[in-house]
Amino acid sequence: MPPTGPAKPIRGLPEKEIFMAHVISPACVSCGACKDECPVNAISEGSPYTIDSGTCVDCGACANVCPQSAIAPE
C-alpha cells in the first residue's frame, strides 16, 4: 500500500529541500499513464505533465508505469 499524507522530512537537509517528490522530464509524451496511477492526484496535464511537489507522497507509482521512463525522484 502506498504511503498517504505529506512527504516526510529528511533530516539534515536545509528547509528548502526537506520534501522529496518525483519530477517529470521533457521525455514525457503526455500519455496520461502516470496521472491515472497517482494515488493522491498530484499530477497535472500539460506538455510535459507536472507533479505538485507539495502533494506528491514520493510513492513512485507514476514512475513505475511511465512508458518513457520520464519520471524520477527529484
Image (spheres, grey):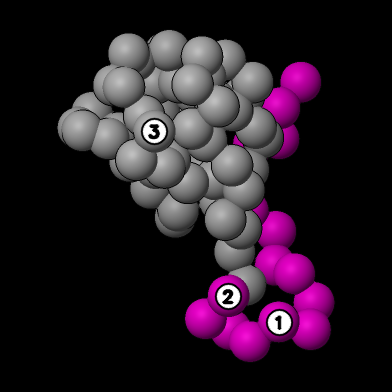
CA gap, disc 2 and disc 3 = 24 Å
| Secondary structure under the numbered disc 1 in the rendered image | loop
For image coordinates 51% across by 14% down, the residue present is: 67
18 in relation to 35, above or below: below
- Residue count near mark 1 (Cα–Cα under 10 Å), binned few <14, some 14–19, many ≥20: few
Q: Nearer the viewer, mark 2 or mark 3?
A: 3
Q: Of the residues under marks 2 and 3, which one precedes in the sequence?
A: 2
Segment tinted magenta in the rendering: 1-17
Q: Which disc number belongs to residue 13?
A: 1
- Residue count near mark 3 (Cα–Cα under 10 Å), binned few <14, some 14–19, many ≥20: few
Looking at the picture, how far across and down is residue 43, in whole percent? 37, 33
- 24 relative to 12 in the view: left or right: left
CA gap, disc 2 and disc 1 = 6 Å
Q: Which disc number belongs to residue 27?
A: 3
Rendering quarter of residue 62: top right
Q: Are marks 2 and 1 in contact (CB under 8 Å)?
A: yes
Dividing the image into 4 quarters, which one contains the N terminus?
top right
Looking at the picture, how far across and down is residue 65, in whole percent? 57, 15
CA gap, disc 3 and disc 1 = 29 Å
For image coordinates 49% across by 21% down, the residue present is: 68
Q: Nearer the viewer, mark 3 or mark 1?
A: 3
Looking at the picture, how far across and down is residue 29, in whole percent? 31, 22
For the stretch drawn in magenta, the main secondary structure is loop
Give the residue type at disc 3. Ala
Give the residue type at disc 2. Glu
